[in-house]
Image (cartoon, rainbow, N blue to C red):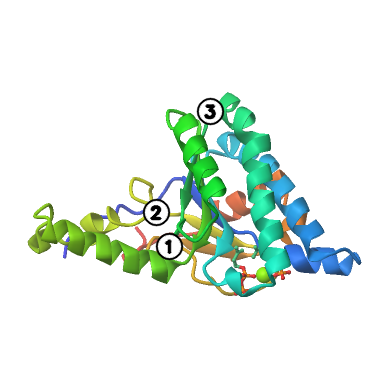
Amino acid sequence: MPNTRALHKRPEPEHVAIIMDGNGRWATRRGLPRLAGHKRGVERVREVVQACPDLGVTHLTLYAFSTENWKRSSAEVNGLMRLFRWYIRKESAKLVEAGVRLRFIGMRERLSKDLQVMMTQIEELTAENDKLSLTVAIDYGGRDEILRGMKRMVEARDAGDFDIADLDEASFGTFLDTDGLPDPDLVLRTSGEVRISNYLLWQAAYAEYEFLDICWPDFTGEVLADCIANYGQRDRRFGAVAG
Ligand code: IPE
Ligand code: IPE
Ligand code: MG
């Protein structure tokens, strides 16, 4: 089989994906309600977004709410949804000004209608921006995304728009929520947990991983810069032998 993926020698990752974990613990350790940790976590996003272009990162994907997070109390889920609305409202002008394109991946239909409308509006508002592509995963699960992708593929085949003979990794990728995005080069997780919790299962098959002991509300642009420097030391072989 030909090696179609060139050995990755770019010192900085083009696409960084982050599992923003540990908001609850950050708050609990300070005697605060969990939602105070989520609020601080959302506030952290701006600094990280701002840091990306100077660090050579052109794509940033953030895990904000998983398909499993509905298991939490309705007070926490509703609080998170309020924070997502607050973020979109507060940041939209700044994202436009900074040239950030914002997109969402995930199921969408289970979110409230007004939030869905806000998400679509900001996607349209920022669609032409090209300084940084920011993707936020809400009601997202990697397994769910793959199943929805399979359904889309079968529907396209039934409509005569897709021939199964053309199915390969690249063509299947076009049926996923991340169609058009490069695969993540580096996946970071805060909070000390060493698991991927259903994040970008297809896309991160060959990503580099770093697990950090700090909680997400303590993550800064400097921490991101350190992670990127560490990434620069990795030898990405993609199964080949280093030259
Ligand atoms: C991450 O922080 C945010 C979401 C999952 C929505 P957590 O809320 O999971 O915080 P911990 O892991 O309980 O500390
Ligand atoms: C993963 O964190 C999801 C997000 C960061 C949005 P969780 O806290 O939900 O994951 P588990 O429960 O530790 O696997
Ligand atoms: Mg957690």
Q: In which quarter of the image is the C terminus?
A: bottom left
In the picture, the disc for residue 99 is 3
Q: Indicate the secondary structure of the residue bearing disc 1.
A: loop
Q: Indicate the secondary structure of the residue bearing disc 2.
A: loop
Pick whichever of labels 1 and 3 is earlier in the sequence: 3
Q: At label 1, which amino acid type do we have?
A: Ala
Q: Is residue 67 above or below residue 219?
A: below
Pointer 3 local density, CA inside 10 Å: few below 14, some 14–19, many at least 20: some
Q: Disc 1 or disc 3, which is closer to the eye?
A: 3
Q: Which residue is drawn at 19% across and 64% down?
A: 154
Q: Position of residue 133 (x, y in %)?
A: 48, 39
CB under 8 Å between discs 1 and 2: yes
Q: Residue at x 43, y 28 (%)?
A: 128
Q: Which of 241 and 179 is in front in this view?
A: 179
Note whether residue 168 is visible.
no
Q: In which quarter of the image is the N terminus?
A: bottom left
The answer for how far apart the CA atoms under marks 3 and 2 are is 21 Å
Give left or right: position of 230 versus 83. Answer: left
Give left or right: position of 136 versus 73. Answer: left
Quarter of the image where one finds residue 202: bottom left
Give left or right: position of 176 versus 105. Answer: left
Q: Where is residue 178 in the image (x, y as percent from the top left)?
A: 38, 52
Residue linked to disc 2: 183
Q: Position of residue 52 (x, y in %)?
A: 59, 40
Pointer 1 local density, CA inside 10 Å: few below 14, some 14–19, many at least 20: some
Identify the residue at the far front of this view: 113
The answer for how far apart the CA atoms under marks 1 and 3 are is 26 Å
Residue linked to disc 1: 204
Q: At label 3, which amino acid type do we have?
A: Gly
Taking the image as four quarters, which one is ligand 3 found in? bottom right
Q: Disc 3 or disc 2, which is closer to the eye?
A: 3
Q: At label 2, which amino acid type do we have?
A: Asp
